[in-house]
Image (spheres, rainbow, N blue to C red):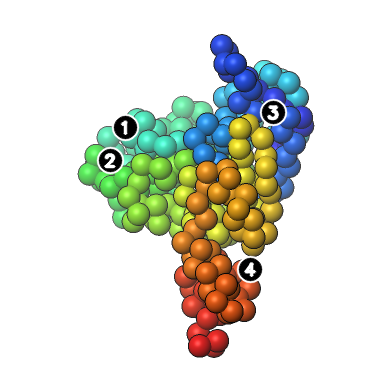
Amino acid sequence: MIEFDHVTFQYEKALTPALTNIDLTIDKGEFVAIVGHNGSGKSTLAKHVNGLLLPTEGTVTVCGMQTSNEDDLLRIRQKVGMAFQNPDNQLVTTVVEEDVAFGPENLGIEPNEIRTRVDKALASVGMSDYATFAVHHLSGGQKQRIAIAGILALKPQILVLDEASAMLDPNGRAELLETVHKLHREGMTVLMVTQYMEETTGCDRIIVMNHGKIVLEGTPEEVFRHTDLLMESNLVPPETVSVRDALRSMGYALKDRSLTAEQLAEELCPLL
């Protein structure tokens, strides 16, 4: 669904490129996490998916359309929904259901269809009971879920999260992640930029970026075998991975798939 072909991007007046020769393919239904330190290029890469940024060199193709083709940009943006860091910047009305309806209304969708889309979108993010609530009464995590509901009401095929959990407390991050995994199980293609490594353990694939380049790529099990390389990229592996590796050094035969507390406990208990 998404293909980067030798993509390089350099911001105006920048001395070095933010992205250098990126080759990347994301298939339909994948859940891909992009991680990296501040300035690694991960958010710049995400903004290329819906044409907010266009390559200096190379091409980005989404659902068969190149983002550099101005005639295709609207159709691309209808297929790619994007959530950003601050949920308050993404909400435009004062009532939850009105905010979710805002996008379809601007596309001229029929009122009955809008009602159906709003109800379905709120149900998808677990916020049906809050339809008539004032937006400013919601928590940060709830606001972010409403922002995603507004995206879902537009019926995109791809959801891009650009550090959407960065401004949330731990409970808000957990709620958001649960919602995103539910959408993925229902068939949504997800590209998630995050600075929290523990959020990546349930993804299909992790892409590690450093200085505008992809330095490591693979399943969570494969990526978390390379803790030294992660540390060199200024990334700290999840605590559960550090505990797993420490236990391995003590002689416990734990598998690579022991990435969460539940998985670690399940493997460890029979060994004790």
Residue that badge 4 annotates = 256
Few, some or many residues within 10 Å of mark 3 (<14, 14–19, 20+): many
| Mark closest to the chain's N terminus, 4 or 1 | 1
Q: CA distance from mark 2 to mark 3?
A: 40 Å
Mark 1 or 3, nearer chain start: 3
Upstream in sequence: badge 2 or badge 1: 1
Sooner in the amino-acid sequence: mark 2 or mark 3: 3
Q: What is the C-alpha distance between the residues marked 2 and 4?
A: 43 Å
Question: Disc 2 vs disc 4: which is toward the camera?
Answer: 4
Kindly identify the residue that appears in the image at 46 percent across and 27 percent down.
106
Left or right of 69 in this view: 231: left
Given contact means CB atoms under 8 Å apart, are the residues at marks 3 and 4 in contact? no
Q: Secondary structure at mark 4?
A: loop
Q: Label 1, on which residue? A: 93
Residue 117: x, y in percent? 47, 45
- Whether residue 120 is visible to the viewer of this picture, yes or no, is no
Which residue in the structure is indicated by mark 2? Answer: 135
* Mark 2 vs 1: CB contact within 8 A: yes
Q: Are marks 2 and 4 in contact (CB under 8 Å)?
A: no
Helix, strand or loop for disc 3: strand
Callout 1, which amino acid? Thr
How far apart marks 3 and 4 lie (CA) works out to: 31 Å
Among numbered discs 3 and 4, the one appearing first in the sequence: 3
Q: Amino acid at mark 4?
A: Asp
